[in-house]
Amino acid sequence: MSFPDVPRRELLGQAVASVIRDQILRGEIHQGERLALAPLSIKMNMSITPVREALLLLAQDGWVAHEAHRGFKVSPIRRQDVIDTYLMWASAEGELSARAALKRSAADVEVLRMIDQRLGEMDDHHTEAALAVNSELHGAVHRIADAPKLSWFSDAAVRLVPLRFNDSFPSVPGWAEVNRYGHTPIIDAIESGDEQRARELMHAHFMTTATLLLEQLDQISFWDEPPADA
């Protein structure tokens, strides 16, 4: 088990949790493995306190279990849990798109078109840069929708699914095409003010990425359980 070099100031709270989560997703920390604070802090070259805080955050999100007097243990990642998380995420994002369709201005749509154009012009969609632009586009939809609670649910889902595919997994087949071409019809629906179509298209957009991810995880035998139909 090894850890990347990350500036000390960033290895706090969520940042530490992200590092440990990526180790779990890559299989370098195994499901059922106990995580002792002292060895982890030594490997990360930092004090125990931020490592403990990170493990508590991971426990809140279900990645590890906190057992009294026994520390932390990596929880099994069930296929159905990933499906359920995507269902929650897709529902929140679909409603955010519907709200955006009702509230959009011409300037709002222009911003969405510009971000979508940048996505379409990118040569490699299996990069941090592509993820950042994708997040920028969805963030713009959130701002137009102006629904803080829905945005909170969507942001919570991000912590529960393996998004950083260029770090954590081989490139997921099909994700590049979804990222490059999948947003334009959603923006069309938002621009036209068709809230129902915007909702349905965004929901389908997220569930398509879920299906592709599940197929990839099935192929690399990620689960400790027999695969079930999505």
Image (cartoon, grey):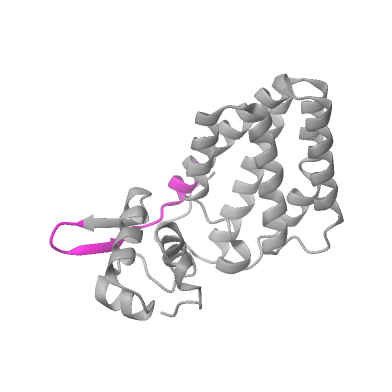
Q: Position of residue 211 (x, y in %)?
A: 61, 48
Q: Position of residue 1 (x, y in %)?
A: 41, 79
Which range of residues does the magenta coloring cover? 67-83
Front residue of 128/207: it is 128
Front residue of 32/147: it is 147
* Residue positioned 41% across, 61% down in the render: 17
Q: Position of residue 182 (x, y in %)?
A: 77, 43
Q: Does 221 sit above or below residue 198?
A: below
Image position of 88 (left or right of 37): right
Tell me if residue 102 can be seen. Answer: yes
The quarter in which the C terminus is drawn is top right
* Residue positioned 35% across, 51% down in the render: 62
Q: Is residue 80 highlighted in magenta?
A: yes
Q: Does 1 sit above or below residue 181?
A: below
Image position of 229 (left or right of 145): left
Q: Is residue 131 highlighted in magenta?
A: no
Q: Quadrant location of residue 66?
A: bottom left
Tell me if residue 205 can be seen. Answer: no
Image position of 59 (left or right of 155): left
Outermost residue on the front side: it is 9
Q: Does 47 sit above or below residue 228?
A: below
